[in-house]
Image (spheres, coloured by chain):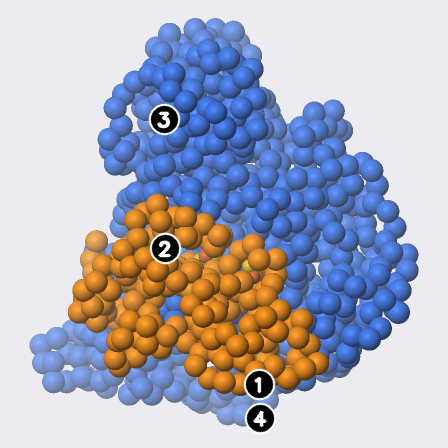
Chain colours: A orange, B blue
Amino acid sequence: MAELHLQVNGKRLTVDVDPATPLLFVLTDDLALKGPRFGCGLGQCGCCSVLADGTEIRSCITPTSQVVGKSLTTLEGLPAYYAARAKVSPVPELHPLQEAMIAEQSAQCGYCYNGQIIKGAELLFKTPQPTEAQIRTAMNGHICRCFTYPRIVAAIHRAARDMAAPKRAAATDHTEEVTRV
Amino acid sequence: MSDDTLARREFLKTTGAVVVGLSVVDKVGAQSPAGGAPPAERGLASGPPDAAQVDSYVAIHPDNTVTIYSGYVELGQGGPTSLRQVAAEELDLELGQVKDVRADTFVSTNGFTAASRTAGIGSVELRAALAEARRVLLGLASERLKAPPQDLSVTKGVVSVRADAKRSVSYADLLGGRRFNRQYEPVLYQGGIELPRKGLDNAIPKRREDYRIVGTRVPRPDIAEKIKGTYEYVQHVRVPGMLHGRVIWPRGQGAHAISNPTVVSIDEASVKGIPGVQIVRRGNLVGVVAPREWDAIRAARQLKVTWAPFADSLPGHEGLFDSFRSAKTSDATDTNTGDVTAALSRGAHTLSATYRGPYQSHGPMAPNCAVADVSKDGALVMCSDQGIYQTRNGVARLLGMPVEKIRVQYYAGSNTYGSSCYRDAAEAAAVMSQEVGKPVRLQFSREDEHGWDNYGPAHLADLRASVDANGKLLAYDYQAWGHTGGGMNTSTQLALATSPPVTTPQGGFSALYSVHLSQTDMYDVPNRQIVNHRVVGGGYLRTGPLRAPMDPSVFFAQEGMMDELAHAAGLDPYEFRKRNISHRRWLGVLKAATDAAKWTPRVAASNLSSARVVRGRGIGLGTHHLPQNQGDRVTFAAAVVDIEVNKDNGIVVAKHVYGAMDCGLAINPGIVESQIVGMSVHGASLALKEEVEFNRTNVTSLDWNSYRTIRCGEHPSVTPIVIQQLHEKSSGAGEEVLPAVVAAIGNAFFDATGVRIRQYPLTPRRVLAALKSATGQPGRSA
Ligand code: FES
Ligand code: FES
């Protein structure tokens, strides 16, 4: 066991763990975060993704000692991280990609969505107007076993549009509106 | 005393719940038909509650909201949202006024969320209970407002007199916080078939023409929570004093009922030095627990368990189909009409072919997880089972407790689409908690889940069929081979150190895995025979229902043969189907899918190209034949799929799926569209990627590299089409497009290449071998 100093979602904190403990278990068990989650423990699926200095990593295979000194962002901290990087104020409740995914009703079980959102947000930071091919390449390492890929891609396109025209993002409505078919 | 209070007394005597308070309930209940005290026993006594009581399904609250108590759970497919829509509709509430609760064996009615039952059965049960609830409420309002019920109308749970809207009263004022105390005749099902109700005086549900919420695209509230990250999955559940648990199972199951895992020895010293680790063992169920999760994982990896070697008797995934054919079988004729043999010999075109479908995995995104807290007085189990009351039975048996002592609560996991290892997780957590006397959170590893799944079974089909000179079907003969290995959960088998039951010549092969084409009037075939050859004994893999059980393989074969016949008769595949189908709903989905795809008639493979990358398009029909669960509820699905085949590397990519579904009354067409999108991509994954691999001793595909699944880079675009049928029964929408897509991809491959592949998945290796052996000649097969 060792005391490790971490920076998670803008907060500095100290955990007392075996330094080889994969970061995922520190986040889920010590910090009780719900975003990053276990899917394979093998680095193959993307359920456990977080951002380390803005780059997506697989927390299930990353020893906690390796992220000391890095700024970690989980799903919980993504809106604030986005606001800081995009110079948006005040901090929105959700990242525009999350708004877009709700608008597209893209998730089914939603278990993979931590990773889809983290990876999609990383893509949008680097490539604000990604092409379909760029989206598919970036997202290829994040499995969805409910097979919602078409709507993930649609949501990333929608978020890219909304981020270029921020007013439209604010207009997204979450209320249970009823439309007749 | 009325019958219902008597029944309640009996129930309370046996469960020992808080009887003092309830005797008051009974008195009040006896005095007035509605308006008794709140149902105090909800959550205190073991269910399921009496289905003939309105109170079992619904409660009215003082803030004029209602709660429905349905046992149907959120599997990620949106079923509970549809049920809230039904409730809001029947009671004339806004959707926001209807809440539901966590499914719980101390609270919920007995719903089983499988086989498309939520919409098909759950909505019918609920509608009947709520029609009665509405009648009670209007009766009370009529007394209060001094106006006959037919002069009243309801908006947002406020009843008012039509001619004088100022005279009004809310549901809350009438019955908020109190009970209905109303018995009614519930809708009952036997073998999935709705039984006729006897009563002449049953409340009549709302006319479908008057629907305002059912039939609309209401967003699912769980989706927003999931995307925000606030949704609570079973993987998130933590309870005080809890230990983290892992099981230690052999890596990859062996031959079912032959290679039963048997512990020879455990080297306890192998985990010395890991803080707080305890080894847990009951029979052959071995696990470790530790206060910290990482310590439990390390211990599970490090613990040296010596197992009796598995038998060298599996056929391997390549030798599987030959071994079916040579195995001892028990044969049953499902259908035999006309004279197939004579009609086969009369055909202008008579074809025979063998089709093969692999074992495939549920492969949930999250390996299953459960939290159990067992004491000597009872047990609380939090898990992701599709049927909470079914879990209760298995857990009670292992813990040696009566079922009423076991409380099971549903917490969603990830996708399951059938019987992944959720019940094994619940049972293992319960046994381990009982052993260590503390709550245990049991999380399976990826290898546990992939290696010990109840796979969708492999399928071998010999087909013979003939058409006359006009392309009209004369004869159809389907001989099916399969093996099922189920009958007992892995955790039960291990904990009891026993061997699971197997199929015998007398039975044990679920009808779920038989082929039944007689259930629908899909094709008009005068002479038809279907024979199921059920491989008896053990020796293969564990199996269980996987989304549209068996149908991907059955429709890959059936629709492949129809395409072969169309080609032989020189007909366009859509034209061929129109000539041989008369049922309007099958024709309806075919038309919808082909219209969306802008289908241009031509004979398949009549436009072959010598390019290295070629395109093709195919049609498939699909449904979910499951008589004992589906009853008369049939969903009709059709798909057109465009694919691209790279002849150099053998990679097939599905580019676009046009999926049409007629599921009767679509309670929420938006949710149905989501299901079509998911099924279309899932179908491409099954057709092109997924196959359980095993050698002679055990399963070897234990992760996402060895068990391949479609990824974002190769997913097809999807055009979902929902055919709304306001006056038909809701028949389920989560399974039926899947087989249609698998079949259409097989047919599209022939259209693209002129070569027929009769075994899926169409992996690069299989594609290259087929193209090579056929040397590109149209009509040749592999
Ligand atoms: S859980 Fe980390 S990649 Fe799967
Ligand atoms: S939404 Fe279920 S795994 Fe992606």
Pointer 1: residues within 10 angstroms few (<14), some, or many (20+)?
few
> Which residue, given by chain and number where applicable, does mark 3 sit on?
B615
Estimate the spatial distance between the alpha carbons at disc 2 and disc 1, rounded to whole Å.
36 Å
Label 3 residue SS: strand
Horizontal and vertical percent for residue B587? 31, 31
Estimate the spatial distance between the alpha carbons at disc 2 and disc 4, rounded to whole Å.
55 Å
- Please tell me in which quadrant of the rendered image residue B132 appears: bottom left
Q: Of the residues shown, which amino acid type is indicated by label 3?
A: Arg
Q: Of the residues shown, which amino acid type is indicated by label 2?
A: Ile
Q: Of the residues shown, which amino acid type is indicated by label 4?
A: Val
- Please tell me in which quadrant of the rendered image residue B565 appears: top left
The N terminus of chain A lies in quadrant: bottom right
From the viewer's side, name the closer residue of A93 and A110.
A93
State the residue at coordinates (84%, 73%): B272
- Please tell me in which quadrant of the rendered image residue A91 appears: bottom left
- Which comes sooner in the sequence, label 4 or label 3? 4
From the viewer's side, name the closer residue of B511 and B613.
B613
> Which residue, given by chain and number where applicable, does mark 2 sit on?
A152
In the visual, does B126 lie left or right of B208?
right
Mark 3 chain: B
> Which residue, given by chain and number where applicable, does mark 1 sit on?
A14
Q: Do the residues under discs 2 and 1 have CB atoms within 8 angstroms?
A: no
Q: As displayed, is residue A121 above or below residue B4? A: above
Pointer 4: residues within 10 angstroms few (<14), some, or many (20+)?
few
> Which residue, given by chain and number where applicable, does mark 4 sit on?
B20
State the residue at coordinates (59%, 66%): A62
Pointer 2: residues within 10 angstroms few (<14), some, or many (20+)?
many
Horizontal and vertical percent for residue B243? 70, 77
Q: As displayed, is residue B259 above or below residue B109? A: above
Q: Nearer the viewer, mark 2 or mark 4?
A: 2
Q: Do the residues under discs 4 and 3 have CB atoms within 8 angstroms?
A: no
